[in-house]
Image: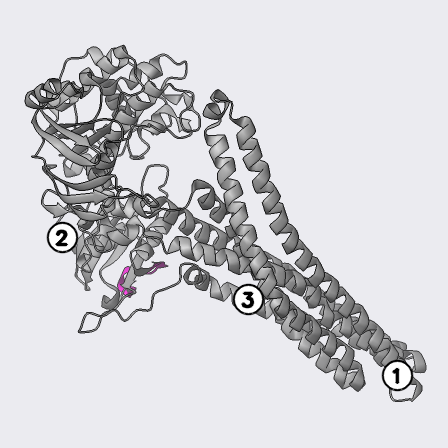
Amino acid sequence: MATKDQRNRPPSARVSIAPRVVSGGPKDTAAPDWSFQNRPFDPLASSISECLRLRGRDVGVDSLLSGHALDGEGRLSPREGVKALESLGFRAHLTRRDLGDLPASVLPAVLFLKSRDACVLVSLDEEKATVIWPARSDDALELASSELQDSYAGHALLLQTKKTTDQTGDSQDTPRHWYWSIVNRFWPDYMQVIFASAMINVLALATPLFTMNVYDRVFPNAALITLWSLVAGVGLALLIDAVLKWVRARVVDKVARRVDLAVSSELFRHIADLRLDGQIQTSGGLINNLKDYEQVRDFFSSQTLASLTDLVFAVLFIAVIAYIGGPLAYPPALALSFVLIMGLLILVPLRRASNADRQMSGVKNAVAVEAVTDLETLKAVAGQGRMQARWEKMVSESAGTQERSRRLATFATTLTAFAQQVSSIGIIVIGVYLALEGNLTMGAVIAAMILSGRAMAPTAALSGLFVRASFAFSTLRGLNALMSQPSDTEAADTSLNAPTEEGAFELRDVSLQYAGAKVPSLKGVSLTTQAMERVGIVGPVGAGKTSLVRVLSGLYAPAEGMVLLDGLNMSQIAPARLRKDVQLVPQEAVLFSGTLAENVAFGVPQATNADVLRVARLTGVDRIAAAHPQGFAMAITERGRNLSGGQRQLVALARALLPRPRVLLLDEPTSSMDTQTEKLFVENLARVLAHWPMTLIVSTHRSSLLALVDRLVVLDQGQIVGDGPKADVLQKLADAGTKP
């Protein structure tokens, strides 16, 4: 285990810089050095973890870092630290305060120190301070207040619990909506938009009042002094109006950007955190949800708030018209009421059309994703025509639902334009009669016309607002359903940060049935493995080997029964900790866009070049790099398509070994390898296992991999039909005329 000084040592160059490839790794017979620094010390994450422990929550560093964007050195940034705390149910904020201004009520708190260090302030008085300084010691330290002041950088991270409980243990906190809780953070900015919109609408009265006074007072009396006084006043109003509109636009853009970043990050984090056993949506459906979020963002933006404010002030303009011209207020008032009523009535069919449009769009996206993802297979089986027919059918049905939505939207827009025109004509007609009777001046009629246009202006946006509202609320319901699906983060709230020591499994009557499946993949499986045992899982195609490996990895929870790891129910172990200690190499190795080095270190972004090179030598990945001019900086395309299946599986093995797991699960790891590569794979893995004991469970139908195991478990139709020492089980299978 690395010492405290080793943990605090600055990491070397990042993996984005390709190290020089040293060939001959597989020929090296020396014991591999597994003391590499694969998790460099993170002062902020360690301090937050200690602070949470003092507040009664044991959250490991792995859980804090999981699902959050790290900085260039693989560390938690202060802003991401706030997000991590909020996702755990705490209110947290960064503050700039003098050390002596921190009251005892906010302690323990995280202090930011110079040289990018951090510590936890437990207590403070004039002479001494009690801190937990992870870079120095795991225990509490007593320092002179002056010494801590010299190291303090002036910023602190304060946190408090959101959820409170009464004496019966019942929660007193109301669950917060995933979307509105984020939007509420920016309420002060929204208030600025409302205030600016209100002032803009008040200043809009300047132009019609100026026009009325010019026609009624300046023209009849040739009052030029009055004219220039009015010009000065209206000019000042227009200048202030322009400034306010510019400021409002800046605030709207700023708030929209910040809300978009916060909400989209929360959406993506939840999708990446979804429990696989609860996921019933297709990839196209999930992508459609992310795409449709833009409609929610656009509708609930600050610009919509400004439009609604303008609509409220339409009542003020109608009131001013009534004050100036009495009956002249009737046409705009009736027109505004007509538009509002028709808009509300049209919402019902528009909502139905929006729901149908969203569903068809999701199905269409699913077809597109399936075709693009498996384009090679599609061409190989000459299935383009069939997929083309399916695509055209979906496009046709989607176009039909979109046409209904557009027809309703056009109807709403037409009604709005009709109401505006009728309102203008009505004011002129009534104004003529009032003017001929001597009850109204020409200036008042002109002012009423201008005010009517200002009052009816929001209705032009209102029809579009109704259309966007139907789409937005339909999308929001879909997103609510998505966000209500179970995720690993929910399990982390009540889980234990328990490291895996022995890697011993116990399965008690475990059954697994995938979502939408009619038949369970596993039925009443009971199995016990010992610490550091090496077990092979064999059986015919469809026997349940992959399902068993998935249950052991914790990616899928059993429908019935229980899975224990080192005597603990696996559901009680923090998912982030479990992912670090139990690594799975799936049957289909998938790589991500980036470099070869980045793919090896994908789950451990803190790994250094030396770490990547060392594990690459142990697994044979260095040979892939040596064969390419760019070495470890070679570009990997989407899903690793520019590598062979065997090469992808070697990279997947290196990726699984880098975090130094206690359990290694392999699901048909050599299914895409030739005989020579498979032999190299087995030799390299045998070397690793010889010098680094771990539990190994491998699912395979290749006899060469059985050299790595001492025990065989035979599956058939989701049930264990054989279990015992490898030689005995192989003999029984041979006697029965069955191959493993």
Residue 253: x and y in percent read 57, 55
**Three-letter amino acid code of the residue under disc 2:** Leu
The residue shown at (35%, 17%) is 625
Say which quadrant the C terminus sits in.
Answer: top left
**Three-letter amino acid code of the residue under disc 3:** Gln
Q: Is residue 417 left or right of residue 201?
A: right
Q: Earlier in the sequence, mark 3 or mark 2?
A: 2
Say which quadrant the N terminus sits in.
Answer: top left
Q: Is residue 468 left or right of residue 731?
A: right
Residue 95 colored magenta?
A: yes
**Three-letter amino acid code of the residue under disc 1:** Thr
User: In this figure, which residue is indicated by the disc labeled 3?
Assistant: 192
User: In this figure, which residue is indicated by the disc labeled 2?
Assistant: 141
The mark closer to the camera, 3 or 2, is: 3
Q: Visible in this render: residue 156? A: no
Compare residues 680 and 214 and report the one nearer the observer: 680
Q: Earlier in the sequence, mark 1 or mark 3?
A: 3
Query: Alpha-carbon neighbours of circle 2 within 10 Å: few (<14), some, or many (≥20)?
Result: some
Say whether marks 3 and 2 touch (CB < 8 Å): no
Residue 206: x and y in percent read 75, 74
User: In this figure, which residue is indicated by the disc labeled 1?
Assistant: 441
Report the magenta residues as a range: 92-101
Q: Visible in this render: residue 81? A: yes
Say whether marks 1 and 3 touch (CB < 8 Å): no
Compare residues 655 and 442 and report the one nearer the observer: 655
